[in-house]
Amino acid sequence: MGFSHLHVHTHLGSHLDGIGSSEQYAALAKKYGHKALAITDHGKMNGIYEHHLACKRNGIKPIYGVEMYVEFKLVREDKEKKKRTKNKNMHLVLLAENEIGYKNILKLNYISNKDKEHFYYRNMITIKELFENKEGVIVGTACMASPFATLLRMGKKEESERLFKKFKDELGDNFYVEVQFNEITKKIDELEEGQKTINDWLIHLANKYNVPIVLTGDVHYPEKGQDEIQTLAIAISRGVKLKDLTWELESKNLYYTDLNDFKEFNKRWGYNYKESDIEEWYNNTDKIVEKCNYEIKERNKMFLPKLTDDDDKALITKSREGLMKRFNVNNWEEIPLEYRKRLTHELEILIRKGFSNYIMILWDIYDYANREGIIYGPGRGSAASSLVLYSLYVTHLDPIEYKLMFERFLSDERSVDVVYDYFGELK
């Protein structure tokens, strides 16, 4: 058994809040002998691939996730005031157990951004939407802003417990309680001892409903003492000078920690849990690590949405049709041989190198512009040297007439050696 950090924020996704990089965290994981490393940025997943590469470079198992903003119900318009109101958003950690879970987290992330009801100040989902897309998703109770902690802060213990039981019933073995240490142990709302009150309540519920407990660090920066940099980042995000910052993070120890740090926090801030319990929660992270076995594919080619069922074939068809339109002919054989050879050559390279999706997306954009009378330029840069783009009416400069070389746009030397059945149709 061992420990891995499962609640980590990076500078890419948790912009101007988390200030560490996945490369820094992965190097620390290697240093401490941690097996895996999760990424759980605030409501964003744009750091996932960088995280994957950083973990691979350091021999660490990558775990993909997000700290999602959730609400009991979505923001609605206040009809009396004739404006929208900002509801309290809460946090839950979502980790991908497998490919299905990863795709469900991507879907939830999309849902959280898809319309004005979900995105208001923050991108949010409802708990109902989480349960509808729960397969393969491991859920952690996150920080002081979780739904369970929020209800506890409001003095609604019974409601907090009912919600906790509902999560256990819905998620089963994929639901985990996170125990965290910080110095916020003063009275906050209905919490007599801040984070300690939340920990004690969640530990009570975990034992009552047989939910595993894991130790998490809520990591925002690599090294101890970098809290001042995080404070500066927050000031930048709010557009104010440090001296004018009216709010500052109370927790100063959100760095990449190890077992000795947790034991020190336990004593220093008066949590006073048994060391044997801390070690058990510490090692329990390995249970999640063993369950999370999905790895995203290396990007040896572009991964873009498909415009059609078969973009390779569609690119050939649209290019041929476009070139016939340029020459105002109805038969492919009526086009000058030089143009037919050049178009065939370009299509072979574009398809071989996996650019069909990209070119078809371009065609879709410019086709819409042409149909709607939207003005755009005749072509600029190396793209003007492509006969395919000219045939698709993306550009309006004939590269053969102006003696422009396609290799300025894309070279064949670095093509992967893949054979496509469609090449027979090109001749």
Image: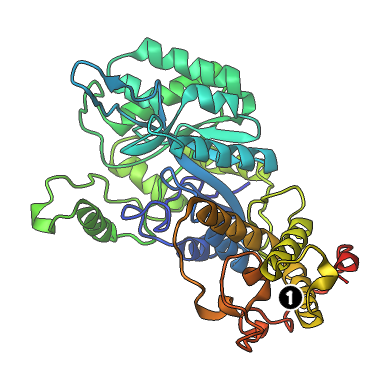
Q: How many numbered marks, from 0 up? A: 1
Vertical arrangement, residue 349 with respect to residue 31, above or below: below
Q: Quadrant of the C terminus?
A: bottom right
* Rendered residue at 49%/77% (across/down): 380
Q: Is residue 24 above or below residue 373?
A: below
Residue 244 visible within the image: yes
Residue drawn at 56 percent across, 80 percent down: 382
Question: Residue 204, relative to residue 362: is it above or below?
Answer: above
Instruction: Please provide percent x and percent y for residue 279.
Output: 51, 41
Q: Nearer the viewer, residue 209 or 315?
A: 315
Q: Amino acid at mark 1?
A: Glu
Residue 58 x %, y %: 59, 67
Look at the image and name its color scheme. Answer: rainbow
Q: What residue is pinned by disc 1?
A: 346
Q: Give the residue at x 60% y 54%.
A: 364
**Picture coordinates of residue 314 (x, y %)?**
75, 56
Specify whether 249 is left or right of 73. left
Please tell me which residue lies in front, 269 or 246: 246
Residue 123: which quarter of the image? top left
